[in-house]
Each structure stands twice: as C-alpha cells, then as structure tokens.
Amino acid sequence: MKGKGHSDISEGQLKDFTESFASFNKITQKLHSAYKNLEERFEDLNSKLEKTNRELRQSLVEKEKISNYLNNILESLTSGVVAINLEEEITLFNRAAEEILGYTTDEVLGRKYGEIMGKGINEKMTLPFTFKSRRSHMNEEKEVLTKGRKKTPLGFSTSLLTDNDNNVLGAVEVFFDLSKLKELEEEVTRVTTLAALGEMAATVAHEVKNPLGGIRGFADLLDQDLEKGDPRKKSVEKIMEGVETLDRIVLSLLNYTKPIRLHLHQTEFISFLDEVIKFFEIDLAREQKGICLVREYPERTLLCRLDPEQFRQVILNLLRNATQAMPRGGKIVVGVNEERKEAGEPKNSLGRYGERRRLVLKISDQGMGMSKATLEKLFTPFFTTKEHGTGLGLSTVKKIVDAHRGDIKVESEMGKGTTVIVGLPMSK
C-alpha cells in the first residue's frame, strides 16, 4: 500500500501488531478479572473489619461496664482498699480509705506507701513487705497515724497483685477501723469488772454497816458519861465524825451497787435544765466563789424521755465538779444542741444505739484540766483526785446516763479546762 506521508507496512508487521493487540487484550481482561477479585476480597475484608470493630467496640463497652461496676464495688465497701505498684507508689485508694485515714485520693495517688501508712510502724506490717517477702497478712492488727496525727487501730489483710502470667505487679491491702470495736471491748471489760466490784462492795458495805452502828452506839454512851468541858469529849466527837464519814461512804456504795430503776417522763429538756441551773446559781451566789454560768442553748423545744430526779443528779454533779476545778473562779458554759445523723451513717461519735436525732449537753469549765492518765480512770469507782471524795460521783453519773441509753465522754487538757459531753436520744 502506498500513499503520501505513510510508510509501507508489511504483512509481517501487521501480523505482529495484531498478535500484540490480542495479547494486550488478554492481559487487560486478566487485570480486570484480578481487579474484580481484589475488589471482592477488599469488600470481604472490609466487612470482616467492620464486624471486628463492632465486636471490639462491644467488648470495650462491656469491659468499661465491668470496670465501672468493680469501681462502684470498691467505692461502696466499708473497708479501706489501697494498692501499690513495684515502686511502692499508691495506685488505688478507695472512699472508705479516705474516711478512715483522712486523706483524699488526689493527695495519695503516686505517693510512696510509707509516707501515708508506714509512719512509725514495723516494716513487716506494711504493704511493700508483702511483695518483697511474697508473704500475705491475714486478719492481723496494727496502729497507724491518720492525716490528723491520730493513732487509729486497724484490722488488715494483704495480698500480691499478679497478671495472667503470674507476674507480680504490686500488692493490695484491705483494712478497717477497729476503734469502735476496741471501745466496746474496753466497755465490756469495764462493765464486767464493775459487776464483780459491785458484788464485792455490796457484801463489804453490809458487813461494815453493822459494826458502824455498834461504834456509834458506844460513842453515844461514852459521850453521855463524860462531863461537860471534859477534854475527852473532843475525841468522842472525832469518833462520831469518822463514823458519819464511813456511814456516808457505805451508803453511797450501797446506792451505787443498786440497779437503777427509771421513772421516765416526756420532758422538755431546755426548761428542765434551766430550772436545775437556777437552783445551782443560788448556791453559787451564797458561796461567792467568783464563778458565773453562761447558757448556750437554742430557744426551741427539745423533748427527751427522762427520769427528772435521777438526771438532776447528773447535771448537779457535773456542775459541782466544774466549780471544784476552778478554785479561783471563772466561767462555766452550759451548751445544748441537736445532732442529726442519717440512718446507718458510720460516723457517729455519740449514739451506740443508732438514733437519728440526739440531744447533746456540754458543760465546759476553765479549770486546771486533767492528764491523760486521769481521763482513762475517770469513771472507775473509788478513783478520785479530791481529798475528801469517795470516787463514786462520776461512776454514778455514767450509770444514770447509760440507763437512759445515752453516752458520756470527757475532753480535757492540762491547763486548758474540761468539757463533759452527754448524748441522749430525743423523743419523736
């Protein structure tokens, strides 16, 4: 074939071109088929990936639910829980731990265990010792310092923290406050001791009372036989005074050992208290000791079920003690307030019986105060710091308060005065 501007194409070249085009066409078809297969595989993989992502999201949601559930359990426990890592840094600190130790979670996370719970205690009783020694503690006791530097007895158990491959990650400690339990143990011991002492005292009092009557009778006869002005009459008077003192002690002892029988009446406490204080102020004015009484109580009705006669003894005894603590005069503050507690609330300084509404009576003086040793023995019968005291006044006060289902405690510091706090259940 010939033409202007065109080269001659041989039949061989045309054949080669045809074959090349056919080959290209086959390759194109293969590529199209491969692309189609790849597209199908991509769609399949994409579908599987979406399914995997859905399952993963579901798994994460479930794990988050489980994590939140476990966290809610930890925060709801009444026992403290603390965990540490291998560097002895705190990684977990639940709400109960905050309440028991006084620290917030933000204050302790990342800090060394020893800075928070290891102060002044044997290293073997600490959490780091558990993973160092690979030995756990089970239901043991120790005493730790709270944030406010208060010594608090704890019951605790420890255990190692490990992963699925049994590698040690740290350790965990579960603990609870033993303060109330220790107080109850002391109360049981005290009551048991007092019961035995009461039985013995009653027996001794009866045995002493008969000889005292004989001594008094013979002293009377001796006094009648002596002439007026006889110097020996003074000796007889001393004998009579001694007998009267012993008789008063024996009578107090017998009254103390008797079970208290209350005659309860619905009583408006503020007016009742004010009446007792007014009578006491008459005695204060007569004695002229330079003591004034300050009232600090609300102007509203506060009802209690009381035995007025017996509880009057409680108030008068506490007021007398306050005046005797201030020989140079001063101020006695009598305060009353209402304390409300939620049902089941653990923080209840007063109220062993769990009442929601309680009346709190406080009597504070500006006297010399008491030492810790004196405070520990304060309600023990026959313990007294007064020269002519019997040691039964505060013991009787506590007995009467206990009979009213109340509580009494004393706060005092040498040179800073004393405050007596009495808690009583209120009437609805």
Image (cartoon, rainbow, N blue to C red):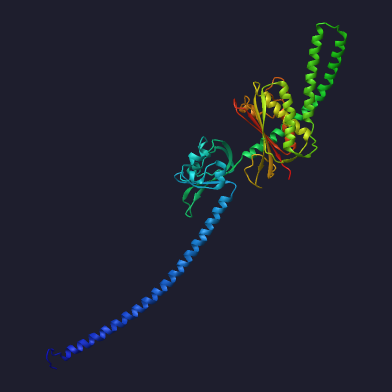
Residue 267, picture quadrant: top right
Instruction: Indicate the position of residue 30 as horizontal and vertical percent values.
Output: 31, 81
| Residue 422 placement, left or right of 113 | right
Q: Which of 105 and 296 lies nearest the eye of the viewer? A: 296
Identify the residue at the far bottom of this view: 1
Q: Which residue is drawn at 75% across and 35% down?
A: 272
Eyeballing the image, is 103 above or below 44? above
The spot of residue 235 in percent (x, y) is 79, 10
The quadrant of the image that shows the C terminus is top right
Give the residue at x 47% y 67%: 54
Q: Is residue 351 shown above or below 334?
A: below
The image position of residue 365, as x and y in percent, is 64, 28
Q: Residue at x 80, y 17 (%)?
A: 243
Q: Residue at x 17, y 89 (%)?
A: 12
Quarter of the picture holding the N terminus: bottom left
In the image, is 154 to the left or to the right of 16? right
Residue 113 location (% of width, % of height): 49, 42
Give above or below for 236 relative to 422.
above
Image quarter for residue 44? bottom left
Residue 289: quarter of image: top right
Is residue 225 among the parts visible in the rendering?
A: yes
- Residue 195 visible from this viewpoint: no
Task: Name above or below for residue 206 compared with residue 35.
Answer: above
**How many discs appear?**
0
